[in-house]
Amino acid sequence: MSTFKAPKGTYDLIPPDSAKYLAVREAIAAPLRNSGYGYIETPGFENVELFARGVGESTDIVTKEMYAFETKGGDKLALRPEGTASVLRAALEANLHKAGNLPVKLWYSGSYYRYERPQKGRYRHFSQVGAEAIGAEDPALDAELLILADQAYRSLGLSNFRILLNSLGDQECRPVYRSALQEFLRGLDLDEDTLRRAEINPLRVLDDKRESVQKQLGDAPLLRDYLCDACKAYHEEVRELITAAGVTFEDDPKLVRGLDYYTRTTFEFVHDGLGSQSAVGGGGRYDGLSEMIGGPALPSVGWALGVDRTVLALEAEGVELELPATTSVFAVPLGEEARRVLFAKVTELRKNGIAADFSYGGKGLKGAMKNANRSGARYTVVAGERDLAEGVVQLKDMESGEQTAVGVNEIVAELEARLG
């Protein structure tokens, strides 16, 4: 046993389960790469003010969950709790918005960190794949991202997820709603912290998961009743576009999400097979975020999908992913000459795109064949001194058990033909 263990609330991804996570990341990224989104990677930590301004100082993420620290040089940094603020910061710093091709379309994949009470589906270290479209205000862009996320989930075989959709209005209509909501909240029996939050950002209270708070919000005013004509028209076009694309959704007038930067379109992907941690992803439009962090006006929209929770959703539905074999051919040499010859053939197979492995450590035939079985290889190539003297190797089909002699110089071509 090692002296050390993974920190509380974290996990290690190890084979064979790690292959599922890789497959999920690839499935989410595939439709993005096919739609003009370029890959971006940002540091694992940023200036703490980036998140305080962008995510919101009244959010639980900033006030309770962020891993913040001060460096030896006095810099105040934080491990990234989400991806959007970092991606937008990087795009602004690199002046991607000045290249003349808006929107700037970016996708990312990485680890994020929040100090939360660990439970199934909620970790202190978690993985997301996200997408951001920066610099354009267009309902078709919002619809595109919703469609691509839906496409990604369906390509994995998921069917029991729901898309919740709402509009949070804009700088014209939201202040009116904000005042109405604050007036309503002041009349409730809420603790001091919640009342203070209501004064800073009352929409945060709607997102409070405590039953004592939620049961008092039944008659809370709804934002949809306060939307201006422009926001109503924008939201209706998003709804029409995704409906025409065959994407089903549910209107959720109480959906606000957990971050302060959202405006207009907001959405969440939920899976009812995950219990209390039902959200597998979400996002929306954040037209004012660029200005919040010191940039120009750049209306933008994006989402992030949780890899961990997507894997849990697949397990809840009993979906088995078709994963590529880690090893297709396993070579078993018997003797020094066979080691030299078969190692060269394994190298050649790999260069030709065939997953091949080798019996290392000088094991005998029995032990090497056990390793071949454990590898999951479809074929095993065995060679000893007598085989090589005859110019052949033994090719064994691990499914049928059939074994045939194949010329040493023909074995690579033979395996390529059999494996297609």
Image: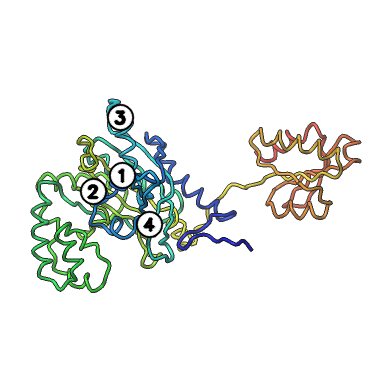
**Relative side of 55 to 130, left or right:** left
Among the two numbered marks 3 and 4 on one chain, the one whose residue lies closer to the N terminus = 3
Q: Name the residue under label 4.
A: 114
Q: Name the residue under label 2.
A: 261
Among the two numbered marks 1 and 4 on one chain, the one whose residue lies closer to the N terminus = 1
Say which element carries label 2: loop
Q: Residue 180 lies in what quarter of the image? A: bottom left
In the picture, the quarter occupied by the N terminus is bottom right
For marks 2 and 4, give the one nearer the viewer. Answer: 4
Among the two numbered marks 2 and 4 on one chain, the one whose residue lies closer to the N terminus = 4
Disc 3 versus disc 1: distance between alpha carbons?
15 Å
Say which element carries label 3: loop
Where residue 403 appears, x then y in whole percent? 81, 47
Disc 3 versus disc 4: distance between alpha carbons?
29 Å
Say which element carries label 4: loop
Which of the numbered marks, if any, corresponds to residue 95? 3
Q: Mark 1 points at which residue?
A: 85
